């Protein structure tokens, strides 16, 4: 799928929410979606990073994005509902959601997993996605009805399908994400909302460097290399694909 060639206007007029849009893969996805015509809603916890992405999109002359500074660690169902109402009023549609924000936590033997860190990783990687999905679904469904399609993409990992020693809470959280995708995809089978997971594979970002500090980042694909798959799943060419895990690269 990394050889998919997206038409330049693939996402024209669409509104797409990207979580963790200030850095790494999410940042690149936000820039790429905007370059293909989407109005992107940039959600993340560090305002300065989101503003930098905003400025880059503005300077390139793409549709102006919106910024939602939010720490998924502390946000509640009420925050998400309020946000969904704002999107409905401001944009009237939500064609796509890329759940990308993620927390690695500490890699450690199972017996050393700290309860507090378990809670934090599960909160950011799983519970916030569950609550945000619940809050956004009415608008996403309505968009699919009115405009023919909508796409929800969760971000998984190789350790979300095959457990690996010492990857503890992070791996377990990604298994939960895979499960959430399958449950929701099955429920939405007869709608025009497709739901999939995307496993980017080892990619040159801050998170990867903290997991593999001895690795030479130059040996890894960059977020930009993965964008054909990120575009494919957000755009009309993936219509009908649902309940699947897409792996960007085997590594
Ligand atoms: P980065 O750490 O580079 O970026 C993660 C983004 O998520 C950052 O923008 C970060 O914000 C944001 N984020 C983290 N915690 C929160 C929070 N509590 N509230 C709001 N935003 C938050 O990671 P990657 O780009 O590497 O990873 C993106 C996704 O891909 C993740 O889900 C990750 O698990 C997955 N993945 C990555 C792989 C890789 O090799 N890179 C491999 C497999 C999966 P801030 O910038 O403010 O810290």
Image: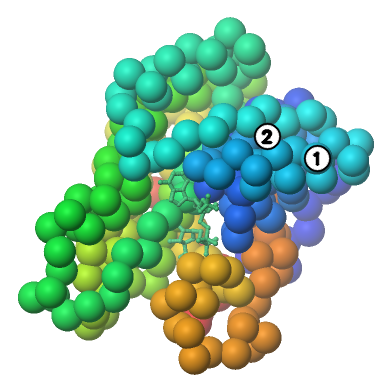
Q: Residues within 10 Å of mark 2 (few under 14, many from 20)?
A: many
In the depicted structure, whether residue 192 falls above or below residue 162: above
Left or right: where 112 falls relative to 14: left
Q: Residues within 10 Å of mark 1 (few under 14, many from 20)?
A: some
Q: Position of residue 28 (x, y in %)?
A: 68, 55
In the depicted structure, whether residue 46 falls above or below residue 219: above
Colouring method of the image: rainbow
Q: Mark 1 or mark 2, which is nearer the start of the sequence?
A: 2
Kindly identify the residue that appears in the image at 47 percent across and 19 percent down. Answer: 84
In the depicted structure, whether residue 11 falls above or below residue 246: above
Is residue 197 in view? no
User: Along the line of sight, which residue is nearer the eye, 115 or 61?
Assistant: 115
Q: Position of residue 81 (x, y in %)?
A: 39, 18
Mark number displayed over residue 40: 2
Kindly identify the residue that appears in the image at 56 percent across and 17 percent down. Answer: 87
> Marks 2/1: CA distance?
13 Å
Kindly identify the residue that appears in the image at 65 percent across and 16 percent down. Answer: 91
Identify the secondary structure beneath mark 1.
helix
Q: Specify the quadrant of the image occupied by residue 14.
A: top right
Q: Which residue is mark 1?
A: 55
């Amino acid at each position: 799928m990394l050889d998919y060639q997206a038409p330049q206007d693939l996402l024209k007029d669409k509104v797409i929410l990207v979580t963790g849009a200030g850095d790494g893969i999410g940042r690149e996805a936000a820039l790429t979606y905007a370059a293909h015509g989407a109005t992107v809603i940039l959600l993340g916890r560090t305002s300065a990073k989101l503003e930098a992405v905003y400025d880059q999109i503005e300077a390139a002359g793409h549709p102006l994005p919106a910024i939602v500074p939010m720490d998924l660690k502390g946000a509640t169902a009420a925050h998400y509902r309020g946000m969904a109402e704002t999107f409905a009023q401001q944009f009237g549609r939500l064609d796509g959601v890329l759940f990308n924000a993620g927390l690695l936590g500490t890699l450690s033997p199972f017996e050393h997993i700290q309860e507090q860190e378990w809670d934090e990783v599960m909160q950011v990687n799983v519970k916030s996605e569950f609550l945000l999905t619940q809050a956004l679904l009415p608008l996403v469904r309505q968009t699919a009805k009115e405009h023919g399609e909508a796409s929800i993409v969760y971000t998984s990992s190789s350790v979300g399908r095959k457990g690996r020693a010492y990857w503890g809470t992070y791996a377990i959280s990604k298994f939960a994400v895979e499960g959430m995708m399958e449950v929701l995809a099955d429920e939405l089978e007869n709608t025009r909302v497709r739901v999939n997971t995307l496993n980017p594979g080892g990619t040159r970002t801050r998170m990867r460097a903290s997991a593999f500090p001895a690795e030479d980042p130059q040996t890894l694909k960059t977020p930009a290399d993965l964008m054909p798959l990120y575009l494919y799943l957000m755009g009309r060419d993936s219509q009908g694909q649902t309940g699947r895990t897409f792996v960007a690269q085997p590594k």
